[in-house]
Amino acid sequence: MKLSICTISFRHQLVSLDHLAQWAKANKFDGIELWGVHARGLMPQVERYTTSLAESGLAVSMLSDYIPLLGERDETKQKCESVCQLAAAWQTRKIRTFAGHLGSRQVNEQERNLMANRLRFICEYAADSGLDVLVETHPQTLADNAESVFRLLEQVNHPSLKINFDTLHVWEAGDDPVDFHRQLGNSVGHYHLKNIASRHQLSVFAPDNVYSPAGTRKGMVPLLEGAVDYHQFLLDIITDDKKSASLEWFGDDVKPTLANDRIALSNFKKDVKLDLPAFN
């Protein structure tokens, strides 16, 4: 499994992409997931950055942005064009977005059909540029539970539509991450990995709290130490070099936490390859 850091982890720090790339390479990461805000801000030097990343053996694993599915169609089209151009410039084939900003139980059939049609349009446009569109499993979106995700995949019915499998949010919805992941099969294009100390602290991942410099980080814990049991889930993906994932850390002590989680995953992978009884 290829592992990336996310530039969003450093959203409240003054850190250059050059520095992050050097640090990621030194700590044996495979790539960097680039937040759309950062990708746009760094566009004047994109050629230098992409060359430098390639020389360091790093890739931009995914461009994470937000394309609206409701509202004016022209707004969706303009944002779609902009994000696809960004992805091409940063030499990544994956665009992460959300399936709207309303939960599956908050929309009526007309709204759902409109959102599915908009998402199909985005996929068609992206496919013309050789890009995949990854919808993230996330609360307050049409991808907020397994049933709605399967229905969305069926409604859109486009090969460029993939799922960014956020394991914690799948668990948050009450679905079994292992079973759901196995049912999705090749529809999964990437993974977001994070954890929480307990279920009652999940509100710490609410966007308003995450994006606020003054937001609480209480409950955010290292990947293998939280309420979500990743061990069985990781058995299905960690030895597959075709899989790609990002450590989506929103808490404090960013570098030490990411470095330690990367080491923990590496050790877990070694144990799996040794076929220790604990993993049978």
Image (spheres, rainbow, N blue to C red):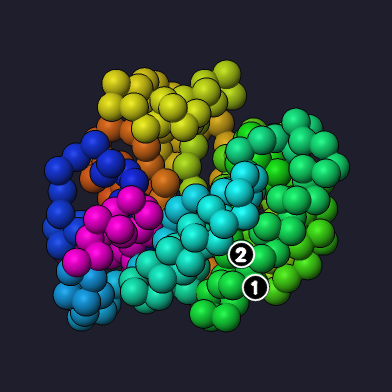
Q: Residue reaching furthest right?
A: 109
Residue in the picture at 70% in, 35% down: 103
SS type, badge 2: helix
Magenta residues, start to end: 21-44
Q: Where is residue 126 in the image (x, y as percent from the top left)?
A: 56, 72
Q: Nearer the viewer, residue 48 or 150?
A: 48
Q: Report the quarter where the C terminus lies.
A: bottom right
Mark 2 residue crowding within 10 angstroms, few (<14) / some (14–19) / many (20+): many
Q: Position of residue 168 (x, y in %)?
A: 57, 40
Say which quarter of the image contains residue 219.
top left
How many marks the image carries: the answer is 2
Q: The residue under label 2 is which amino acid type? A: Ile
Q: Nearest the camera: 109 or 24?
A: 109
Mark identifier at residue 122: 2
Q: Which residue is drawn at 47% across and 42% down?
A: 194
The residue type indicated by label 1 comes to Glu
10 Å crowding of disc 1: few (<14), some (14-19), many (20+): some
Q: Are marks 2 and 1 in contact (CB under 8 Å)?
A: yes
Is residue 99 located in the magenta-colored stretch of the structure?
no
* Residue 213 image-quadrant placement: top left
Does the image show residue 10?
A: yes
Relative placement, left or right, of 85 versus 120 is left
**Secondary structure at numbered mark 1:** helix
Judge left or right: residue 64 versus residue 21. right
Q: Mark 1 points at which residue?
A: 124
Q: Which residue is drawn at 23% across and 71% down?
A: 46
- Distance from disc 2 to disc 1, alpha carbons, whole Å, reads 5 Å
Residue 248 shown left or right of residue 181 in the figure: left
